[in-house]
Image: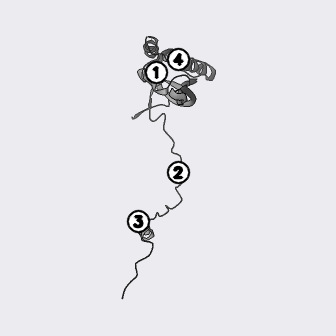
Amino acid sequence: MAKSVAKVREFRAEAKFQRTSPQKAKLVLDMIKGLRVEQAINTIHFSTKRMAPVVEKVLRSAIANASYVSDEQGLDVDVDNLYVATAIANEGPRMKRIRPAPMGRAFRYQRRLCHIIVTVAEKGKVVDAADAAPVAAPSKTAGKPAAKKATAKKAAAKKAVAKTGKKKAVTA
């Protein structure tokens, strides 16, 4: 019998408008991607980066979300079996600031903000394919014939005619 992986529920937490650049936040997030939750917390806890406490807080929030949702919906989620599925830092809005420059001028610079998203999931459980047989959804284009597309040669010929402006006259 073929074995397949059952659909795994993911739980996420976000920290928006954090006062750091996404590049600096990604340095911390890359350290924990794919790790088990307990190991990820230990890794972040002993990191010297300034964003480490913020990422740790978001990770703990995602774990708490997993625990809460599993209790509320009656899911069987083992918190000890969770791992960091995704950890990303998206770019947020930029704050435009002005710095004094020589001779009465001003230089503009931007303070970057980021949105940190951490998703935790439980390690996949192996299920027999007969138990979880997927049902194929009917395709939308099953009854419709495929529309013909213009060939590339015709498009190229039209462009060549448009460039010259006139068709060549036939001489007899």
Q: Nearer the viewer, mark 1 or mark 4?
A: 4
Give whichever of discs 4 and 2 has the lower sequence position.
4
Q: At label 2, which amino acid type do we have?
A: Ser
What quarter of the picture does the C terminus occupy? bottom left
Query: Badge 1 local density, few (<14 within 10 Å), some, or many (20+)?
Result: many
The answer to which of 49 and 116 lies nearer the viewer is: 49
Mark closer to the chain start, 1 or 2: 1
Q: Earlier in the sequence, mark 2 or mark 3?
A: 2
- The crowding category of the residue bearing disc 4, from other C-alpha atoms within 10 Å (few below 14, some 14 to 19, many at least 20), is some
Q: Amino acid at mark 4?
A: Val
Alpha carbon separation for disc pair 1 and 4: 18 Å
The residues bearing labels 1 and 2 have C-alpha atoms spaced at a distance of: 35 Å
Determine the secondary structure under disc 2: loop
Look at mark 3 in the image and give the residue it sits on.
156
Residue that mark 4 sits on? 54
Among the two numbered marks 4 and 3 on one chain, the one whose residue lies closer to the N terminus? 4
- Is disc 1 placed on a helix, strand or loop? strand
Image location of residue 82, percent across then percent down: 48, 20
In the image shown, does 99 or 28 lie closer to the viewer? 99
Query: Comparing marks 1 and 2, which lies closer to the viewer?
Result: 1
Give the SS element for disc 4: helix
Above-or-below relation of 2 to 35 = below
Q: CA distance from mark 4 to mark 2?
A: 45 Å
